[in-house]
Amino acid sequence: MRPTFIFAMALTASTAATAQGLPDLQAKSNWFTAGETTIQELIAREKNTGRAKNVILMIADGNGIGTNYATRLYVGQQLGKLGEEHVLPYETNGFYNGIVKTYNINAQTPDSAPTAGSMNTGVKQRFNMINIGGTGIHNDCSTVAGNELTTFGEIVAAEGKSVGIVTTARLTHATPAAVFSKTANRNWEDELPEGCTAQKDIAAQLVDGLKSGFIDIALGGGSRYFVPKGTATPNGGKGHRKDGVDLLADVKSAGIQYASNRSEFDALDMSKPILGMWTDSHTSYEADRPDTEPSLVDMTKKAIEFLSQNEEGYYLEIEAGRVDHANHAGNFARTAKDGMIWTEAVALADEMTDDKDTLIIVTADHEHAISFNGYCGRGTPIQGLCYDVAKTGEMHSDKLALAADGKPYSVISYANGSGSILKKGEGANDYSGSRPEVTQEEAMDLDYLQQALIPMESETHSGEDVAVYAKGPWAHLVDGTIEQNVIFHVMNYAAHSGK
């Protein structure tokens, strides 16, 4: 190996040679020198081939490349930047990255259940099913037996590691359920079709996982699916279970701690298994979250502290589920705020762990039908209306860009959704309309729905690729364009290879 000083001299010479003969306005440009710095950082990057004691899979649901781009600008703009130049915590040179193909076995545009399932089992799955093999049939309970897939969590739990789940959705929802559940229908959260004996409902499967010691900590929402129909939940609502089973009583009798609000969360005993649910359904959007609910950052911190007590290591899946829900609503302002707290959770997970023994993978399960309009100037508020490009300087002009109809338009729109400019008429298929005039103040409101084209009650996913970022042991295996199920294989290899 060459001495360090010789290597440093070679890098300096390389940089000088690159700039040789270039005019000062180019060679001394901040863009040019920053580019050279990036190259040297990439050259100096070392591959970690140690064994991953811990694996953290972080999924921002619906945070495809477009949504992530919008989140980057939003976060940067909240920090006083123009936005475009901002770098999110997982976009640094410390992370390797690649592109992920998200389709399901039988769907061009994917569903969250099989996408999360593919990352947890290593095989692609069928639309609206969780961890059932390819010959399983959606909504057909008879095809479950013999088709159950083994999850990464089950593999490492059998080896002595702890397993945890954190989500801002219901714990029985598609992405968190992919850690532990096997079901022919992702919607069987608390009830099954008559005569279905091949599987339990998803809530019951979670409780079984907690009682058996497979799952050590689970934090999120969804208490209504654990309480008999009509019975009060700990969160002030009514239970949903038609079978009359009180799963929360079952949990408590098994010696598992239960927390239903922030104060109980803060008082948890870190020596016993934990189930925490702060809401009857999904947790609140970050923009609306009351103090009684722990944030995604709070839950991330608690889960890592708890799981780190196991000297054998752990597997933790963390989901920012409400990024997806706000996109479905066509409401980018709430998408952005949940995206921002998501980036803070990633930064905290990275800060609390050691790259030497912890593999962190940051990704999304799918993208949405989100689009970006016009030729907007730098610094245009990403959730607002598009400003024209200025002729001088970097900042946008003060003039709003206008479409051919003479009206301004938002930077972001959706191809479909409840914000459609087409409104239903008297006939069943009678839709018509035109774009309304919108002010910047209206577009920046928290409740504003971005304009959409195709009318739908809920905006849909799209089949576009998503990005994946990785840091820690064997993170360099995340490279190129990969199938989504390969993420499991990276985790599995890292947890069982190296020293």
Image (cartoon, rainbow, N blue to C red):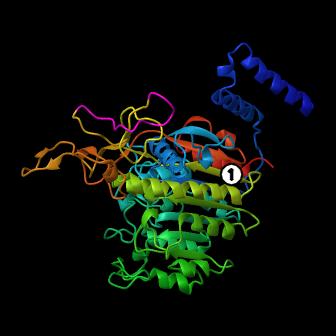
Estimate the x, y position of residue 36 in percent, counting from the top left: 71, 28
| Vertical order, 166 against 40 (above or below) | below
The quadrant of the picture occupied by the N terminus is top right
| Residue drawn at 40 percent across, 54 percent down | 333
Q: What kind of residue is marked 1?
A: Leu
Q: In the image, is 87 to the left or to the right of 471?
A: left
Query: Quick one: which residue is furthest to the top in this view?
Result: 21
Q: Position of residue 397 (x, y in %)?
A: 41, 36
Q: Kindly tell me whether residue 285 is visible in this rendering.
A: no
Q: Is residue 469 visible?
A: yes
Q: Residue at x 38, y 47 (%)?
A: 384
Is residue 178 toward the left or the right of residue 97 in the image? left
Q: How many marks?
A: 1
Picture quadrant where residue 298 is located: bottom right
- Work out whether residue 8 or residue 222 is closer to the camera in this orientation and state it: 8
Which residues fall within the magenta stretch? 391-404
